[in-house]
Image (cartoon, rainbow, N blue to C red):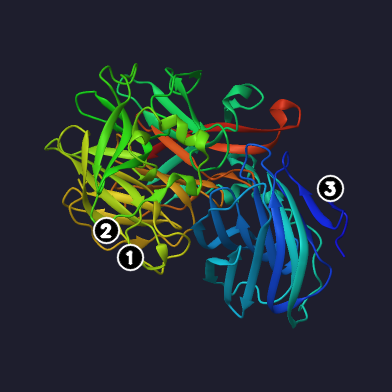
Amino acid sequence: MIPPKRGARVSGGELILDAVNRAGVRVFLRKPTLSDLTLTCKILVESKGPGVRAFEVCFHSAGVASHQFVHVNRSAAILGWVKRESLWNKAASVANARKENAWLDVKVECDKEQIRFYLDGKLVLEGTDSHSKAGRIGFGSSQALVRMKDIRVEGTPATLDKPWREDAPQAPVLFGTFHELQPKLRHTKVSGKLDISVSKPFIISSKITNPKLGTHEQPHLFKMPCGDIHLVFHSDGDIHGATRVLLRSGDKGKTWAPMPISVNRHEAVGVLRDGTVLVYDDYAFRKEGNVFVGQMCVSKDGGRTFGPVELAVFRRPAGAASVAAGTYWKAKDLDKYRTTSANWSDQLCHALWRSVLQKKDGTLIACAHTRYKGDEKGKARVACYHSTDGGRTWDSESTVAYDPDIGGEGFVEPVMSFCSNGDVLCMMRHGLWQARSADGGKTWQPYRTLEVRGVDPDLCLMTHGVLACSYGRPGNRIMFSADGTGREWTDRIQIYEYQRGSFGYTGIVEVQPGKLLYVYDRHGAFAEYDGKQTTAVQGVYITVKRKG
């Protein structure tokens, strides 16, 4: 029997979970409790709402906040687990071709630590996870209206060591901005080499003050030669091809105004020594063979204005893979590219991500996550590209990192920066890994883990030689390399701790010598808006001084 829950009901033989306008709904069956199991059901996701439109099948649940799950959204199928002290952990994932407004045949098999997930009779995801070994069955919905029926479960009966917990975790100590955290959690006395202070947070933009700018999620920051700061974020949720919007500040982040976006998916930015600014779209489309084209635009006045959209050419290795846009895009999303890149084909890949650097000889280097044909388990790798014609044509320089046994989807979301000693450092997700090149990106030393979880890192080499790295999930944090080499990092300073209150995507720029602007997305109840629920991009200033 399913306990009553807001957003969940049983009607006409169907379990209906309505979370179109809610962060999420989960329900759990009171019986059975199983270890090995096979679960089958039919699931229909209605095409309602702008969000991720996800359904979840939960299993081996010891409580509301302790179980394994398969999460299927508009772009991916994800195998993961949650614990009361660790609320989102990914074990494996794949790009997903899930249908909407059609009943899906869903099947989950658990054989000891082996988990397999099927859609319409096809094995689409498998992985190994041992965090939970027995428990109840449950179902969830996030930003979606989901219908479920014909639920059948069989397996090996089991008994939980402790009673099943109905309560969700409450962690007020681990929630809040820097100034709301207990002093022992602030970690400002780092390495004995730096004095670090953090300002009170301020809201840059929100769905309440700027509803036309949408969801206000996953921000990135870029500093222009003219002194302006560009803030880019998602306006329609965490989906592939999500629309982005652009704000500009001319006063170091104090005030912001909308600015026309230059390319559809404003993702990577390069600032050249002569003040030229290059902006690249996230995606490139196959033209012929292994030649891809993607949107770019150029500013000749330091980022004040940008010229028309042009096409950059990406010459990829023979073994590079691509995917049909229809795998996780709708036709209207592809329409944004019809007049440029998508004239060639709908086969796409990621182009460049976050950073474009210029070497002393004028060559440009940049990085992206990608997949090659034949890569084991479909794991992504990070590749380094170079351009000798001012960023119009890019060739693959080298592989920064690849490991078929790495967690999640592989190495993704890279960012590069020069170090104080001239090395190039690349920081990557999952969780946080780094690789170093001493020859300008031609070859890379063995990558290493920082033994900390995190997503979508950002790097900034400050004027006094300190290298800063921001990241999120869990919590939005920042760390520093005092000598600017990235070989040793300070304690992780907690800027904003949350319980599902942020995507964990962050951005940093130096607004004046020794002072950073740090931005992140936040959602929940805001005291500034009389307790109303909303999403917003929030910022803090972080001042970094050397001791002695």
Q: Is residue 385 above or below residue 208?
A: below
Question: Mark 2 highlights which residue?
Answer: 319
Question: Mark 1 highlights which residue?
Answer: 374
Q: Are marks 2 and 3 in contact (CB under 8 Å)?
A: no
Q: Are marks 2 and 1 in contact (CB under 8 Å)?
A: yes
Who is closer to the viewer here, 245 or 241? 241
Q: Quadrant of residue 501?
A: top right
Q: Are marks 1 and 3 in contact (CB under 8 Å)?
A: no
What residue sits 69% from the left and 55% below the top?
A: 103
Which residue is the extreme one toward the left? 361
Q: Earlier in the sequence, mark 2 or mark 1?
A: 2
**Residue 304 at x, y = what percent?**
34, 16
Who is closer to the viewer here, 531 or 334? 334
Mark 3 lies on a secondary structure that is loop
Looking at the figure, which quarter contains the C terminus? Answer: top left
Question: Mark 3 highlights which residue?
Answer: 6
Q: Is residue 375 above or below residue 463?
A: below
Who is closer to the viewer here, 489 or 247? 247
Mark-to-mark CA distance, 2 and 3: 50 Å
Mark 1 residue type: Gly
**Disc number at residue 217?**
none
Q: Earlier in the sequence, mark 1 or mark 3?
A: 3
Viewer-nearest of labels 1 and 3? Answer: 1
Q: Is residue 35 above or below residue 491?
A: below
Mark-to-mark CA distance, 2 and 1: 8 Å
Looking at the figure, which quarter contains the N terminus? Answer: bottom right
**Residue 473 at x, y = what percent?**
54, 51
Crowding around mark 2 (Cα neighbors within 10 Å: few <14, some 14 to 19, many 20+) is few
Count of residue discs: 3
What residue sits 28% from the left and 31% below the top?
A: 311
Mark 2 residue type: Gly
